Image: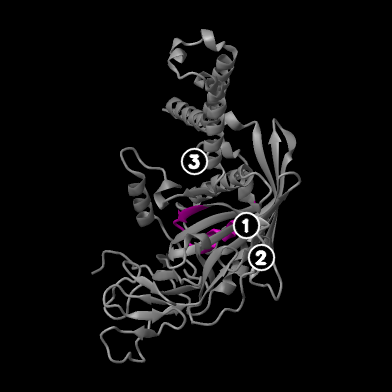
Amino acid sequence: MLQRKHLLERIVCYFTAMKFFRLSTLWLVGVLLLCTAAGFLLSVQLPHAVPLLLLLPRGSSRFVHLLPVVAVVLLFLWVYYRYSGPMERLRSLEDVGYIPERGRSRLHTSNQVRRLRKKGDLPPVYPNGWYQLLDSHLLLRGQLKNISVLGEQVALYRTQEGQVYVVDAYCPHLGASLTVGGQVVGNCIECPFHGWQFSGEDGKCTKIPYAEKVPEFAKIKTWLSCERNGMICMWYHCDGLAPTWSIPEKEEITSREWVYRGRTEHYVSAHIEEIPENAADIAHLAHVHSPCVISGVDLRYTDSKLWKFIKHTWKVQWQPESEPNAHCSQMFLEHALTLFGKHFALLDLHVVARQVGPGLVFMTFKHKFLGSGVILQSVTPVEPLLQRVSHSIYYQKNMITIIPKLLLWAECKQFERDIMIWNNKKYISKPLLIKEDSAILRHRRWYAQFYSENSPRLVFQQQGLDW
């Protein structure tokens, strides 16, 4: 049985490596074949070439020499079209972080783990703060979308003038969904059921097609929103209080010095606080994130002997900021790569991850040769123990697109390793910590500012045999 386990591990590592090299090998073979064909055609004298050339119209045979050039140009254009655009990697909840049993699907496994896993003594499930709803470029003028956030369904729409509004997704008249068949009319959203129109600014009903007068009490719930750094965000406070801080503007994004190069999206089955707490959990970096990203995301096989020669090393420091930015914290990270135990300085990377509020992180990175950029991480609660996490990368526009896409891919792989932990762990309110874990307690004290007395909690029904 043990031999079979080791054999399975080797097979998985082998196919992980093959998956990484397969695409590049195919391209190399394809280019070599094209070059060989081009060399053959250009070296052959046309009068003695393929007899079929005699069937061509007079004078057209000279264009045969251009065929390899045309083929190479078409190949280049296809590669450019396929790989120059922004990267997009969208994963469902069951796609990452679960180990399905034999004969069971990933969906069945994820549902079973979520149902049976012990939850622990959880903090409030919805901290107060700004939360990302959608990337700006995904909402066009005149378009509306349904968004699941904070246990609610909201309608997000953009007017023809470009203004964004967030209202309740259900019409207060008879409960029709405004996002299924609804229309954007001016700055209002129109219900598909009876044509009622509601203003996105204050939620008041502005029109009822069959009524002589619109009653004052006819209105829909609205949420304060803002659009910044290519993100559409919504403010939440359990007591309905106004924002006490704002989202900082990234000048490089506003001025288009840094441009959008892609995004990833994952769903994590965990309490929202677990995800940003990773920044203060310094010890886990060496154990979870040292193995090379090429070794995959399944923690059973990441520490494979196949990739022992390459390691990531990390130097990390986490600290909260002081007033007036007490709602912010920073993680300073120095990344290095070792090959066969030797430091490979070309891939040294300096990262400053600044968390703003409970769910927004600005990961700004700089490299001596590869330039600079930022990954915007947003953690948005969908429901009490389900978080939607997105990473959008903006990079200096004079750098070839493959660089930011590789950085985002590597961040995505490392993040998916964490998901395997989060999706299966229990939250411990009083963890067993040692001196080297002190930053975790400091992070929890810092994060507690986003809860208030009326913040909603998840209440579990006690099950037993008593009737």
Q: In the rendering, at what x and y percent does residue 60 appear?
A: 50, 21
Q: In the rendering, at what x and y percent does residue 378 appear?
A: 54, 61
Amino acid type indicated by mark 3: Asp
Residue at left offset 53%, top offset 60%: 274
> Is 268 included in the stretch rendered in magenta?
yes
Which residue in the structure is indicated by mark 1?
279
Compared with 406, 21 (above or below) is: above
Quadrant position of residue 130: bottom right
Tell which of 450 and 24 is nearer to you: 24
Q: In the rendering, at what x and y percent does residue 211 appear?
A: 27, 88
In whole angstroms, how far apart are the C-alphas of marks 2 and 3?
30 Å
What is the crowding at mark 1: few (fewer than 14 residues within 10 Å), some, or many (at least 20)?
many
Which residue in the structure is indicated by mark 2?
329
Q: Quadrant of the C terminus?
A: bottom left
Secondary element under disc 2, as helix, strand or loop, is strand
Region of the chain picked out in magenta, as a range? 264-282
Residue at left offset 42%, top offset 47%: 95
Nearest to N terminus: mark 2 or mark 3: 3
Amino acid type indicated by mark 2: Ser
